[in-house]
Image: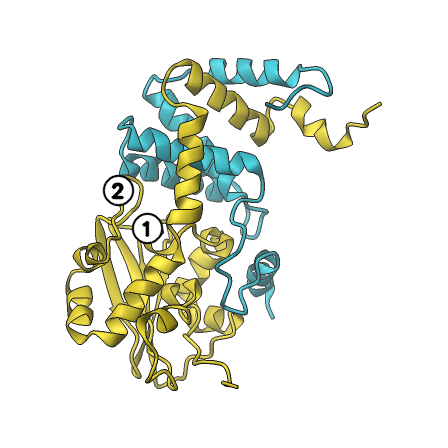
Chain colours: A cyan, B yellow
Amino acid sequence: MTGTGDALLALGAGDGPAPPSLNGELVFEAPWEARVFGMAHRLCDAGLFTWDEFRQALIAEIGRWEQAHPRGAPYAYFERFQAALEALLTTRGLMANAELWGRAKALAARPHGHDHG
Amino acid sequence: MSHDHDHDHDHDPSSPALRAEALEALLVEKGLLTPEEVDAVLTQYGERVGPLNGARVVARAWVDEAYRARLLEEGTAAAAELGIKGGPGGQMERLVVVENSPSVHNVVVCTLCSCYPWALLGLPPRWYKDPAYRSRIVREPRAVLREFGLEVSKEKAVRVWDSSAEVRYLVLPERPEGTEGFDEDALAALVAREAMIGVALVSGPAVTP
């Protein structure tokens, strides 16, 4: 088995390309992935952008990442999804990068044992 | 006292989890969404949308020749006959159903991102989104299918459908032998998501007792 083949199999190892009946598989590996997925769909449903506009942002973001990384580099689809959503909201003027960064820093500064809710 | 190794990432403002939390908080403040609305999307995709919808379409096509013809002719309308509609983000605007046969095997990919007929198949599996699958299935489909455990005979053509236009594809697998007496529900239960993407076949029933 050559390198790329191993890569595909390795990436499948968690959810296993075989056997075929994988319908119960967990598709989100972390809660935040579900939240960004849900946010993108909600904002699309609410008419802030069309799904095709989001798709174009996602294609651009994935393309940028693939240009910047060697084949086989660890790939995190939902990080690209998240970056695409942030970029789309920013270009639409719905949010500024500085706002997001400021809020993330504020959340990071929470004391240990904070209430996640 | 609490030991917080598990939460170290919570103190890195560039971590995806924290950015997602920050983004949701900002969007809520701006009145663009509520956490409950996001929850509702996830409930919809997790529970009400899923590969069972695709399996129902396949099973109907297997038992109803006229439906099969309509499905191959106009996929979106045929899915809607069974109450399956996309809505925004459901990616069902133009569904094209491609049929496997003794001479052709079909397999679906989205080379540019991860377009997928969610309303029929639920959330895409991880490997579908992976760069290795997206690039290799086009270049060497037989080798990739072999890694999924599917050996396609040399006599059979392999067609790879790239979802990167506005089109979403669904593979109509071949009905397995040994299912002659099966009703639609029993047939649908045999159809896994992977068969409708084209990286697996539908197996017949296990040995009956």
Q: In the rendered structure, which amino acid carries the disc numbered 1?
A: Ala
Q: Which mark is residue B119?
A: 1
Is residue A13 left or right of B54 when viewed as pictured? right
Camera-nearest residue between A9 and B203: B203
- Pinpoint residue A105: horizontal percent, then vertical percent: 60, 16
> Could you say whether the residue bearing mark 1 is in a helix, strand or loop?
helix
Q: Residue at x 72, y 28 (%)?
A: B8
Q: Is residue A77 visible?
A: yes
Q: Residues within 10 Å of mark 1 (few under 14, many from 20)?
A: many
The relative height of residue A97 versus residue A9 in the rendered view (above or below) is above
Q: Which mark is residue A16?
A: none
Q: Is residue A84 visible?
A: no
- Pinpoint residue B207: horizontal percent, then vertical percent: 51, 85
Q: Residue at x 39, y 33 (%)?
A: A40
Mark sitting earlier along the chain (1/2)? 2
Can you say which quadrant of the picture contains the N terminus of chain A? bottom right
Residue occupied by mark 2: B87
Q: Quadrant of residue A47?
A: top left
Camera-nearest residue between B131 and B20: B20
Query: Which of the chains bears the disc numbered 2?
Result: B
